[in-house]
Image: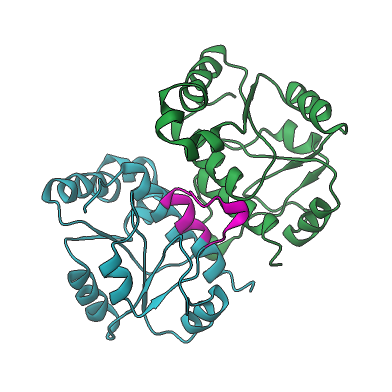
Chain colours: A green, B cyan
Amino acid sequence: MASAVTNLDLHDIARAARTYGVQSFHVITPLDDQRELAEKIVRHWTRGSGGEHNPKRREALELIRLTSSLDETRAIIQEESGLPPAIVATCARRYPNATKFVELAERLKAGKPHLVIFGTAWGLSQDLIEASDAILEPIGDHRGYNHLSVRCAAAIVMDRLMTFRL
Amino acid sequence: MASAVTNLDLHDIARAARTYGVQSFHVITPLDDQRELAEKIVRHWTRGSGGEHNPKRREALELIRLTSSLDETRAIIQEESGLPPAIVATCARRYPNATKFVELAERLKAGKPHLVIFGTAWGLSQDLIEASDAILEPIGDHRGYNHLSVRCAAAIVMDRLMTFRL
């Protein structure tokens, strides 16, 4: 199942990625028209008039890489960093053996590249979750309600992993 | 300076508020047309067809209270909880004597109502910041970049204050 790429997801997640010093933000969609739309938005803010008027936004959107598959993203990261990334799935449900935030924060400090993946709309597919190297524990099951937007969930996950407060 | 109320700010912040067990989410704008627009959105999701199709969204948007001033919001909280709230301003800049997240998390546990305020667009006015009872420390000054969307900033602040991980 493929869902739509939204303008605000691109902006919000790129801004959070830049804030927390994340290396790159990969937007993966098999849909050509969605990728073209995202390309147009990224171009406007990185090489067009958007970036001239708002250099802070350019700095954020420059982190975006657009691909059509997880394999393509994995290859880009391997090329850029010299190592294949460990794939970490995120999910609102709790899996047995889920990796704790504090554990993943420790692993990130060691320097090996990690790709933390988020799904929009219905979340990640079951195949993707099972094929990942690790599944991150859910943000929480506060009072049984766990329906954050992907933008807010990604920002919270970056905050927990990158500020080393744990 | 008054800025626009956006549909996604309402949804994202209400969903995060519901997730973290926040009592109510007050949207304050002096602009009648903005308040009417927000009212329409909230009505659609709490009493209209939106809420019927998506009860989880209704649960979140039911937390929204719309007012035209901080005084009005303060009066509503005092009426609902029996005590006037302590007003906590948020700001991307660091103030001397800013309250640390861990300190505010401790104060919240004591049960007195607190109103944590966020500004959209250009942030909160200087008057509002100076009139508040406390100013929360900024989320961070990671590598000099601090340009989170208000949606993501509010979600991160709730996560830091309400999960008691500090």
The part of the image, by quadrant, that contains residue B63 is bottom left
Q: Residue furthest left?
A: B32
Asked if residue B151 is among those painted magenta in the image, a careful observer would answer yes
Name which residue lies at 80% across and 34% down.
A131
Relative side of B129 to B111, left or right: left
Q: Residue at x 49, y 57 (%)?
A: B155
Across and down, in percent, residue B123 comes to 35, 56
Residue A121 is at least partly visible in this image: no
How many marks the image carries: the answer is 0
Residue B62 magenta-drawn? no
Residue at position x 39%, y 55% in the image: B14
- Kindly give the residue lying farthest to the top in the view shown: A32
Q: On the image, which quarter does residue A100 sit in?
A: bottom right
Find residue A24 and report its horizontal and vertical position in percent: 67, 35
Q: Which of the two residues, A59 or A42, is positioned nearer the viewer here?
A: A59
Quadrant for the N terminus of chain B, please: bottom left
Instruction: Give the residue displayed 62% in from the left and 33% down from the top.
Output: A63
Give above or below for B70 relative to B97. Answer: above
Which residue range is magenta in the image? B139-156
Instruction: Residue A76 in the image: state x and y as whole percent.
Output: 76, 25
Q: Is A41 above or below relative to B159? A: above
- Residue B104 location (% of width, % of height): 49, 78
Image side of residue B47 versus residue B146, left or right: left
- Left or right? Give the position of A107 relative to A160: right
Which quadrant of the rendered structure holds the C terminus of chain B? bottom right
Q: Is residue B5 visible?
A: yes
